[in-house]
Amino acid sequence: MNSGAPWPTLLAAEVRVLDHQRKLHRWARTEPARRFDDVFNLVCDQATLLVAWEQVSNRGAKTAGVDAMTRYAIKDDDVVPFLEELRSKLKDGSFTPLPVRQTTIPKKGGKRRVLGIPTLTDRVAQMALKLVLEPIFEVDFYPSSYGYRPGRRAQDAIAEIHLLASRSYEWVIEGDIKACFDNVDHQILMELMAERVGDRKVLRLVSSFLRAGVVEQHGGFAASLTGTPQGGLCTAAHNPPYEKCRVMRSVGPSSLVTPGSGTERCT
């Protein structure tokens, strides 16, 4: 797309992005062995970045990364110049993600969950990646998978359990992968992504987010050699393919029931 071309309206951008997503989803579904070798141009598309901005600016608008910039720092008249600068850096390869800002939120039982908050610019770039990659990987999920999928939620999984429990199933097994996000192997994850995506620019961009590092709460810097921080948009895209291919295919069902798991009889 010509860099001097006018930016589309939000409505036109949403229509264009939806059309891209439908095509990617259809091609991925009808050609299971297909590798997508030319999708970076879609990540940098004006429409993709505009929709990415709209979605990011409506989520966590008050949350800042290490640069202390929130959505409110970008006035309406500054949105297009902001996106144009990001687009230019993505296209010429000069874009480099900043480290995420470490913070914590409370969990049940008095524990704390560690989050990594990307900068506003990085969140927009991550969302652009998500808009393009999600339709491709979505077709490879198991029908019984509900986590981090568009149009699905925990209540849907509960409803399916109720349905199955009414049809002769008697037991529910609850399991958890300890520190799953912290232990994602970057090399394995990138190999799995490369099975579907052959565009090296996209793969390098994803890898750069994985290796961006963390600015810890006390001010120190920690390299991110493994794992993907919770709090970034890419976490939702990274974990399910990794969990499906690396975990569910490498252990037997009996191995999933550990001392930390729970079982409950359906009554």
Image: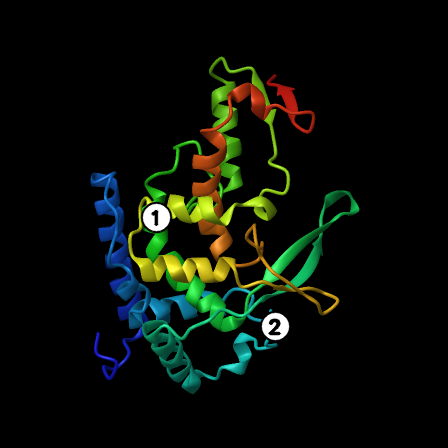
| Color encoding of the figure | rainbow
Q: Residue at x 79, y 47 (%)?
A: 110
Q: Residue at x 66, y 62 (%)?
A: 102
Q: Which residue is mark 1?
A: 194
Q: Which residue is mark 2?
A: 66
| Pointer 2 or 1: first along the chain | 2
In the displayed orientation, state which residue is furthest to the bottom. Answer: 77
For the residue pair 171 and 122, the one nearer the viewer reads as 122
Residue flagged by tag 1: what amino acid is it? Answer: Ala
Q: Residue at x 35, y 60 (%)?
A: 202
The quadrant where residue 175 appears = top right
2 and 1 marks in contact (CB < 8 Å): no
Residue flagged by tag 2: what amino acid is it? Answer: Val
Q: Mark 1: give few (<14), some (14-19) or many (20+) Cα within 10 Å.
A: some
Residue 193 falls left or right of residue 113: left
**Residue 117 in picture, x, y percent from top left:** 59, 64
Residue 75 sits above or below residue 159 on the image: below
Residue 34 sits above or below residue 10 on the image: above
**Residue 216 in picture, x, y percent from top left:** 69, 64
The quadrant where residue 98 appears = bottom right
Q: Mark 2: give few (<14), some (14-19) or many (20+) Cα within 10 Å.
A: some
